[in-house]
Image (tube, rainbow, N blue to C red):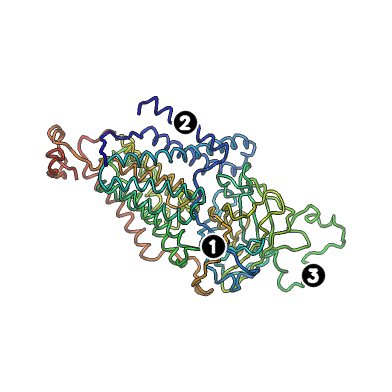
């Protein structure tokens, strides 16, 4: 395999994709489906229809951009060497092929579903070089696989009892909560105090809202993310606060892959809802898997700045750039 | 890629998305739960407790409270078991859910009946309509079964009245004269309705929809049946080519549920298939539990491990902050 050091730059495309995902999520999936139920808004039916149309266009554009981004992510991985890069490329390419085959009814929808789950696992393996950052991604993928399994192994798939379906759904919810709570591990460096305060604020605010109307949480979780929302509202509040804190901190530190990855994961959810949403999760895993691997402090930085008490010295492997201090 | 090329690529992708929207050619496909409508060689009938129905493996669809539009609430039924068959030119769909009481009459203002409903997009589209009664530009077709419309009030003769006017003149029966479907003399347990948004629910003239429910051993089994080809506008056609989006709702009258207070599912998909139904070890009637709260282990995970993990990650980050990191 040829090794090309020039990276495929995707910032504009994944940034546009993230923008479109937010637009379709807010306008189509949430906005136009709730606005029409607000008393007194009937006279704004025409603007709401236009808003729905904008959301629908955003959805189509997001699907088209997602295909382009998955192709580009596969190409980018293929231009690197090593089995991990190839596995990442395989995840994107195989998912696209199966989704296409499903679109044209060449294969059964269930086969597309199983292929989607396999692609998620492959994409996670493709991110194995991330170090501790893989923890939240692995938890999220576990949740998605559990939720997908509960769907695919019913009916013709057969074999799952009602208790097993319940257990898988609960496991998927616990996993997505743990993924959100461990999301700070995605950051290169600790979040600022402002980010922590914003996260705590969101936690308290959402806990208050969900305590007042716990069923609202259930329906939002079910419809937006595909999970039944059977757990305590406090757990979801903590998870939301954690994700908001991480997104804010990543924005502050310029870690665009993390912010965009979180947006794509939020748009994708875990419910195995459509190839579009599963594709968003695959793209998010590959994108975050391409983020810089481990937070490091160079020798120059060590000399020029005081070192944290907990930092430890490690000698990097030969040929990897010499002595470095790994901020563990 | 240079900036000009990137911009050209982005504009090209947006144009492609626009064309796809115009043609309604969605490259993505649904991956939600797929409910197979299996082919059978004899009439399965409308008795959901019969072996013809009970030997088929169901698909378990999770439900939650309706919290989008007032009156909100419900959610006491956590899941519905769905089976579907087709025989000759008719589609049969059975909903089964746990309900310890059979609420057959609504003879007092504070009494409400058990009921169930199936909702389809009136016209197939690239995106599903709003789950609550559809939306202005995407109507829905709703099949509703009501226990109080299925049989006479217990203890009352078949031809008995609970209210009597001293005249046969239609004008004395104002609701019936106005076309209220619930006031008609011919009792029909199922109604074929269409809606294009909240407050627009309208009964159709269709008479091809049939249905019946039976309550046994703590659960309802309700079967709906309709020809594959509709007999009026705004009703879906079922064919083997294209899956149809479908959502479910049930009402528990003893819990005060009526109108928007109900347990609802997200949209799943129904596919007419020429294959035989999957049969297997279906839990016996008495073995199927009502809603089961999470197990103690899950409770431990959520209420102990999750907050500990959240606090642990936070403390870990805060204690390893570098002194020069404070940017806020």
Q: CA distance from mark 1 to mark 3?
A: 35 Å
Closer to the camera in the image, B137 or B316: B137
Element under disc 3: loop
Q: Chain of mark 1?
A: B
Residue B112 image offset from top left, x and y in percent: 64, 62
Q: Are marks 1 and 3 in contact (CB under 8 Å)?
A: no
**Who comes first in sequence, dot 1 or dot 2?**
2
Q: Is residue B316 left or right of residue B232?
A: left
Q: Nearer the viewer, mark 1 or mark 2?
A: 2
Count up the numbered dots.
Answer: 3
- Which numbered tag is attached to residue B80? 1
Q: Earlier in the sequence, mark 2 or mark 3?
A: 2
> Would you place residue B44 above or below residue B179 in this image?
below
Report x, y in % for residue B22.
57, 36
Left or right position of B32 against B49: left
Q: Position of residue B114 (x, y in %)?
A: 62, 64
Q: Secondary structure at mark 2?
A: helix
Question: Which residue is found at the position 42% from the left and 27% from the top?
Answer: B7
Q: Residues within 10 Å of mark 3 (few under 14, many from 20)?
A: few
10 Å crowding of disc 2: few (<14), some (14-19), many (20+): few
Can residue B101 be seen from the camera position used here? yes
Q: Quadrant of the N terminus of chain B?
A: top left
Element class at badge 1: strand
Would you name the residue on which mark 3 appears?
Answer: B159
Query: Which residue corresponds to mark 2?
Result: B12
Residue displayed at 62% across by 35% down:
A46
Q: Nearer the viewer, mark 1 or mark 3?
A: 1
The subunit letter for the residue under badge 2 reads B
Q: As rendered, which of B149 and B108 lies closer to the eye?
A: B149
In the rendered image, residue A311, in percent from the top left (x then y), is placed at 16, 43
Are the residues under marks 1 and 2 on the same chain? yes
């Amino acid at each position: 395999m040829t090794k090309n050091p020039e990276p495929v730059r995707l910032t504009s495309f994944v940034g546009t994709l993230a923008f479109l995902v937010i637009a379709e999520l807010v306008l189509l999936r949430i906005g136009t489906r709730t606005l029409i139920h607000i008393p007194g808004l009937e006279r704004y039916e025409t603007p709401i229809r236009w808003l729905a149309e904008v959301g629908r266009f955003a959805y189509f554009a997001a699907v088209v951009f997602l295909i382009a981004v998955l192709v580009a992510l596969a190409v980018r991985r293929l231009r690197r060497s090593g089995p991990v890069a190839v596995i990442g490329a395989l995840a994107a390419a195989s998912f696209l092929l199966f989704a296409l085959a499903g679109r044209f009814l060449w294969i059964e929808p269930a086969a597309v579903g199983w292929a989607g789950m396999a692609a998620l696992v492959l994409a996670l393996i493709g991110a194995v070089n991330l170090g501790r950052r893989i923890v939240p991604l692995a938890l999220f993928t576990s949740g998605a696989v559990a939720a997908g399994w509960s769907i695919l192994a019913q009916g013709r798939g057969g074999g799952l009892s009602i208790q097993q379906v319940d257990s898988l759904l609960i496991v998927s919810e616990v996993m997505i909560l743990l993924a959100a709570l461990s999301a700070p591990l995605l950051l290169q460096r600790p979040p600022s105090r402002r980010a922590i305060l914003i996260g705590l604020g969101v936690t308290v605010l959402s806990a208050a809202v969900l305590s007042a109307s716990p069923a609202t949480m259930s329906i939002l979780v079910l419809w937006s993310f595909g999970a039944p929302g059977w757990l305590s509202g406090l757990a979801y509040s903590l998870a939301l606060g954690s994700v908001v804190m991480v997104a804010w901190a990543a924005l502050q530190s310029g870690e665009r892959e993390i912010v965009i990855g979180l947006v794509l994961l939020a748009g994708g959810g875990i419910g195995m809802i459509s190839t579009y949403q599963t594709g968003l999760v695959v793209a998010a895993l590959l994108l975050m898997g391409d983020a810089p691997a481990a937070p490091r402090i160079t020798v120059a930085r060590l000399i020029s700045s005081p070192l944290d008490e907990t930092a430890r010295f490690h000698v990097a492997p030969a040929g990897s750039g010499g002595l470095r201090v790994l901020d563990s | 890629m240079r900036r000009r090329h990137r911009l050209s690529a982005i504009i090209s992708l947006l144009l492609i998305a626009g064309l796809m929207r115009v043609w309604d050619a969605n490259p993505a496909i649904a991956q939600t739960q797929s409910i197979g409508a299996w082919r059978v060689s004899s009439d399965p009938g409308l008795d959901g407790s019969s072996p013809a129905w009970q030997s088929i493996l169901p698909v378990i669809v999770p439900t939650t409270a309706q919290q989008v539009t007032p009156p909100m609430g419900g959610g006491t039924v956590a899941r519905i078991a769905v089976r579907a068959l087709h025989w000759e030119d008719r589609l049969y769909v059975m909903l089964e859910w746990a309900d310890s009481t059979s609420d057959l009459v609504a003879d007092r203002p504070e009494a409400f009946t058990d009921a169930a409903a199936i909702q389809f997009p009136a016209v197939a589209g690239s995106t599903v309509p709003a789950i609550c009664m559809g939306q202005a530009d995407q109507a829905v077709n709703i099949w509703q079964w009501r226990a109080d419309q299925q049989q006479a009030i217990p203890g009352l003769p078949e031809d008995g009245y609970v209210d009597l006017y001293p005249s046969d003149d239609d004008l004395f029966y104002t609701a019936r004269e106005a076309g209220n479907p619930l006031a008609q003399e011919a009792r029909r347990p199922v109604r074929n309705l269409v809606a294009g948004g909240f407050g627009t629910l309208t009964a159709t003239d269709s008479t091809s929809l049939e249905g019946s429910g039976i309550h046994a051993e703590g659960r309802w089994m309700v079967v709906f049946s309709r020809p594959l080809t509709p007999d009026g506008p705004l009703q879906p056609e079922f064919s083997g080519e294209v899956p149809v989006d479908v959502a479910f709702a049930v009402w528990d009258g003893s819990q005060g549920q009526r109108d928007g207070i109900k347990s609802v599912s997200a949209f799943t998909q129904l596919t007419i298939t020429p294959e035989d139904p999957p049969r297997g070890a279906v839990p016996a009637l008495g073995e199927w539990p009502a809603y089961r709260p999470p197990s103690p282990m899950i409770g431990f995970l959520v209420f102990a491990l999750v907050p500990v993990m959240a606090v642990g990650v936070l403390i870990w980050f805060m204690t390893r902050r570098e002194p020069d990191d404070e940017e806020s």
